[in-house]
Image (spheres, rainbow, N blue to C red):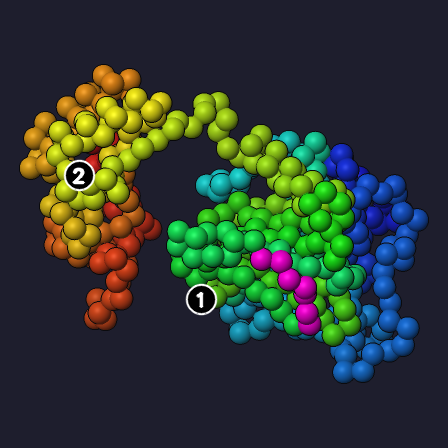
């Protein structure tokens, strides 16, 4: 349920067991006032705000005529340059090089079936859209809040609209920011490395910024975009826990910051490192969706919220995933049809449901130094091709799967020799390779057409 109290200037977002409250300040900044257990309508914004008892030194007033200090206010859309020195949600540069943007409340509306074209997302029924406008230049910022009542989930994202006559540069455009008035939490992250992913780390928060991120082009096994804030005393089945995640698998960052005045700020979204997105006049940039949840029943309560949401709204639950075997560790690149069928027949006896043919079925792929991009069958290994092999696999009452990495290309490949410009690299600089391969430029329509036609034919 989404409510707005015109008299108190308060937004209230309610799920089954949680409440999220925002307010419009006298300066028109959008304030984050509360997120936690279900709460009835508060009497005023002052119920939540934590004002310093005395004027603070080394601080910057918002305007000379008032005593507003943005560095000590809980904000929904913080920016840098008007006195808030914490990690911002947004950082935008206009054509003159000016970067101090000040977004103020303009209006709001309820949207039904809000959908972001081309983005991974959860299907939504009702979404609160709050529009802020930049005080001087009029740039429009749209904040989106969607409620999943039964799962106790709030989905947040934003869009920046360039309503000026000149291009803008987005140095940072994260998806969500939450300011807490207390810093009495532990941080839980999922960290690791290749083949040892998602090891649980829990440690107390300290002053300064704790950052997890990926610059690899994928969210990666190093740091998962998920993290949680826990009461110091919280355990598996008791205590307050906040969970955060992204519906996004590319470069990301999450900043968890405690200010010198014990205020806690959390924000997350696309990694701002080397971002610099050019937004042309009349264009709009949408950020990925951030998933927020709260539970007062410990880590298990938070997990159940997240799991139920993902299972019900993001993953395909119509068909159970089959038990799968592939041939990689059994054969590596050295296989033929006879070897593969022997593995499949043995696997069927153990109740396995799907056989997946792994790396080495295409081009001249006898090791990992060649042939990515040449997605045609290696007839030396498979004289009858994939068609005959798949038919024999299916006669064993097994599904047939195929390993493919369509986004990659080997310098030693027919595709690269024909189209070297299709790989992401500088023409005059020797590239740094990973596993002897480069990445295809999927922003090139010719590359997309080639992959679609080749894999569809296959």
Left or right of residue 87, residue 339 in this image: left
Q: Which residues are magenta?
A: 201-207
Q: Report the disc number at residue 361.
A: 2
The residue lying toward the viewer, choosing from 13 and 402, is 402
Q: Secondary structure at mark 2?
A: loop
Q: Report the disc number at residue 274.
A: 1
- Residue 151 appears at what percent x and percent y? 67, 34
Query: Picture quarter containing residue 383?
Result: top left
404 versus 235 height, above or below:
above
Looking at the image, which residue sits at the far bottom? Answer: 58
For the C terminus, the quadrant is top left
Q: Which residue sits at x=21%, y=44%?
A: 332
Query: Picture quarter containing residue 342?
Result: top left
Look at the image and say whether residue 202 sits in the magenta stretch.
yes
- Residue 190 appears at what percent x and percent y? 54, 54
Q: Which residue sits at x=83%, y=48%?
A: 10
Left or right of residue 59, residue 266 in this image: left
- Residue 349 appears at what percent x and percent y? 30, 22
The residue lying toward the viewer, choosing from 332 and 99, is 332
């Amino acid at each position: 349920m989404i409510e707005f109290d015109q008299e108190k200037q308060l937004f209230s977002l309610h799920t089954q067991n949680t409440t999220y409250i925002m307010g419009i300040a006298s300066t028109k900044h959008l304030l984050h006032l509360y997120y936690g257990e279900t709460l009835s309508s508060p009497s005023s914004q002052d119920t939540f705000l934590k004002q310093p008892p005395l004027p603070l030194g080394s601080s910057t007033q918002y305007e000379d005529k008032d005593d507003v200090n943005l560095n000590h206010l809980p904000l929904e859309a913080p920016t840098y340059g008007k006195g808030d020195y914490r990690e911002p949600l947004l950082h935008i540069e206009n054509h003159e090089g000016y970067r101090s943007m000040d977004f103020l409340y303009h209006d709001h509306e309820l949207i039904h079936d809000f959908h972001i074209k081309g983005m991974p997302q959860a299907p939504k029924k009702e979404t609160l859209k709050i529009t802020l406008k930049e005080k001087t230049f009029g740039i429009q910022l749209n904040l989106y809040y969607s409620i999943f009542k039964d799962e106790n989930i709030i989905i947040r994202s934003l869009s920046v609209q360039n309503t000026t006559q000149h291009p803008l540069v987005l140095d940072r455009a994260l998806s969500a920011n939450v300011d807490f008035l207390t810093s009495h939490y532990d941080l839980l992250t999922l960290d690791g490395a290749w083949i040892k992913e998602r090891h649980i780390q829990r440690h107390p928060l300290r002053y300064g910024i704790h950052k997890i991120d990926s610059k690899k082009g994928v969210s990666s096994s190093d740091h998962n975009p998920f993290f949680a804030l826990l009461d110091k005393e919280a355990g598996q089945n008791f205590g307050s826990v906040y969970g955060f995640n992204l519906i996004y698998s590319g470069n990301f960052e999450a900043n968890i910051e405690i200010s010198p005045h014990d205020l806690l700020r959390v924000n997350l979204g696309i990694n701002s490192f080397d971002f610099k997105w050019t937004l042309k006049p009349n264009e709009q940039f949408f950020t990925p969706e951030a998933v927020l949840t709260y539970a007062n029943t410990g880590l298990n309560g938070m997990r159940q919220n997240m799991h139920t949401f993902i299972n019900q709204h993001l993953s395909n639950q119509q068909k159970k995933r089959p038990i799968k075997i592939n041939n990689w560790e059994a054969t590596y690149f050295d296989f033929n049809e006879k070897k593969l069928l022997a593995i499949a027949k043995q696997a069927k006896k153990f109740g396995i449901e799907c056989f997946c043919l792994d790396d080495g079925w295409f081009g001249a792929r006898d090791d990992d130094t060649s042939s990515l991009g040449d997605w045609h069958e290696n007839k030396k290994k498979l004289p009858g091709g994939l068609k005959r092999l798949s038919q024999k696999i299916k006669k064993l009452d097994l599904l047939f799967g195929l390993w493919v990495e369509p986004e990659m290309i080997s310098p030693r490949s027919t595709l690269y020799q024909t189209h070297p410009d299709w790989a992401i690299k500088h023409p005059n600089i020797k590239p740094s390779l990973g596993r002897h391969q480069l990445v295809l430029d999927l922003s090139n329509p010719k590359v997309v057409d080639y992959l679609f036609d080749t894999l569809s034919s296959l």
